Image (tube, helix red, strand yellow):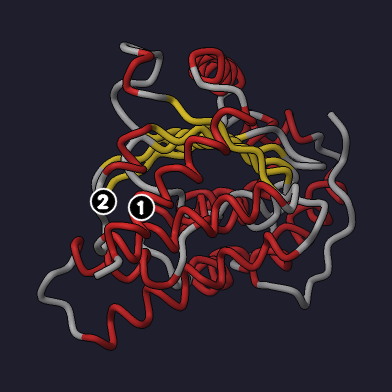
C-alpha cells in the first residue's frame, strides 16, 4: 500500500491526528496492516486515518493510545477533530469529499449538494426543517455553499454525476428556483467542470432503486462509498463493498443518456421552468 503523503499539521485537527498517527506507528515499527490487526480493522482504514479521509472515533483513539504507547494523546485530541459544521450522519463523508481527487454520485431525488444554488438549497433545508429558525437555515446554507468551493479548482476533484429525472421534475422552490438551479448545472457542464448524465424515467428499473450513492477516490488512501437515506448515512471502506457499489454506479451510467443528450435535456427542462415563471 502506498504510504500517505506528508500532511500539514496546522491545516486541521484531523490532519494533525493523521500525521501523529503515522509518526507513532512508524516509530513502533508497525505497518498499517499490523496496526489494523491490533485494532480489529483493515490496514486500509489505518491508511485513511493517516491521510485524513476518515474521522477518528473515540474507541479507536483509546486503542491507539494503548497499542502505540502514546499516553492519552489521541483521546485528548479526538474530540477536537470530531467537531463539524455538518449533520452527524454526513459529517465524515463531507470531510472526506473535501480531499477527494474524484467523486461519482447518483442523485435520485435532488440536485447534488455540490451543485445546488443558494435558493435551491434554502428550499431543501426549509422542507427538511419547516419549524427551524432563519438562523439555523442560514447556518446550514453557509455550510453547503462552503462545500461547493471545492469546485473552484479547475482540475480536482473530477466530479461526475447521474441525475435521476425525478431530480429535475420535483419543483423545489418553484419554477424560478428550478430554472436557475438547472442553468447552474448546465453552466458547470459547459465549462467542462463536471460530467453529468440523466437517467430518464423511461429507463425503467435500475441498479440503485433504493437511494443515493456517492463514491470517492483519493490520492493516498483507498476509495470510499457513502450510502445516504433520510437523516442517516453510512461510509463504507471495505474493498469488496466499495467495488460492489462501483459496479452499481457503472450500471446506472450504462442506463443513462449520454452527456450530450443529458445536457440538451436539462437545458430544455430549465427553459420550460423559465417560461412557466413568466407572467
Q: Position of residue 134 (x, y in %)?
A: 24, 86
Quadrant in which the C terminus appears: bottom left
Nearest the camera: 5 or 93?
93
Q: Kindly identify the residue that appears in the image at 24 percent across and 46 percent down.
A: 230
Q: Kindly identify the residue that appears in the image at 45 percent across and 42 percent down.
A: 268
In the picture, the disc for residue 208 is: none
The residue to which callout 2 is attached is 231
Q: Position of residue 209 (x, y in %)?
A: 31, 21
In terms of image quadrants, where is residue 149? bottom right
Say whether disc 1 or disc 2 marks the residue closer to the N-terminus.
1
Q: Are marks 1 and 2 in contact (CB under 8 Å)?
A: yes
124 left or right of 150 in image: left
Provide the secondary structure element on which disc 2 rests. loop
Q: Position of residue 31 (x, y in %)?
A: 81, 34
Q: Is residue 17 visible?
A: yes
In the picture, the disc for residue 89 is: 1
| Residue found at the very far bottom of the displayed protein | 135
Q: Kindly identify the residue that appears in the image at 44 percent across and 63 percent down.
A: 180
Categorize mark 1 by other alpha carbons within 10 Å: few (<14), some (14-19), many (20+). some
The residues bearing labels 1 and 2 have C-alpha atoms spaced at a distance of 7 Å
Q: Position of residue 192 (x, y in %)?
A: 75, 47
Q: Is residue 50 visible?
A: no
Amino acid at each position: 500500500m502506498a504510504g500517505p503523503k506528508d500532511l500539514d499539521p496546522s491545516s486541521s485537527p484531523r490532519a494533525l491526528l493523521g500525521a501523529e498517527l503515522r509518526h507513532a506507528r512508524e516509530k513502533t515499527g508497525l505497518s498499517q496492516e499490523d496496526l489494523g490487526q491490533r485494532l480489529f480493522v483493515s490496514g486500509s482504514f489505518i491508511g485513511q486515518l493517516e491521510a485524513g479521509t476518515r474521522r477518528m472515533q473515540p474507541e479507536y483513539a483509546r486503542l491507539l493510545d494503548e497499542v502505540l504507547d502514546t499516553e492519552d494523546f489521541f483521546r485528548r485530541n479526538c474530540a477536537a477533530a470530531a467537531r463539524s459544521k455538518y449533520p452527524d450522519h454526513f459529517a465524515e463523508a463531507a470531510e472526506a469529499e473535501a480531499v477527494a481527487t474524484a467523486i461519482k454520485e447518483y442523485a435520485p431525488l435532488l440536485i447534488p449538494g455540490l451543485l445546488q444554488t443558494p435558493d435551491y438549497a434554502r428550499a431543501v433545508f426549509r422542507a427538511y426543517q419547516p419549524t427551524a429558525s432563519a438562523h439555523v437555515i442560514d447556518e446550514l446554507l453557509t455550510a453547503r455553499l462552503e462545500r461547493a468551493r471545492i469546485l473552484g479548482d479547475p482540475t480536482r476533484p473530477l466530479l461526475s454525476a447521474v441525475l435521476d429525472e425525478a431530480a429535475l421534475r420535483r419543483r423545489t422552490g418553484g419554477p424560478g428556483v428550478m430554472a436557475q438551479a438547472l442553468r447552474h448545472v448546465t453552466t458547470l457542464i459547459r465549462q467542462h467542470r463536471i460530467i453529468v448524465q440523466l437517467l430518464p424515467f423511461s429507463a425503467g428499473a435500475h441498479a440503485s432503486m433504493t437511494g443515493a450513492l456517492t463514491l470517492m477516490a483519493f490520492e493516498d488512501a483507498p476509495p470510499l462509498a457513502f450510502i445516504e437515506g433520510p437523516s442517516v448515512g453510512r461510509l463504507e471502506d471495505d474493498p469488496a463493498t466499495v467495488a460492489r457499489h462501483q459496479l452499481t454506479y457503472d450500471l446506472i451510467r450504462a442506463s443513462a443518456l449520454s452527456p450530450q443528450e443529458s445536457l440538451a435535456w436539462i437545458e430544455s427542462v430549465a427553459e420550460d421552468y423559465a417560461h412557466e415563471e413568466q407572467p
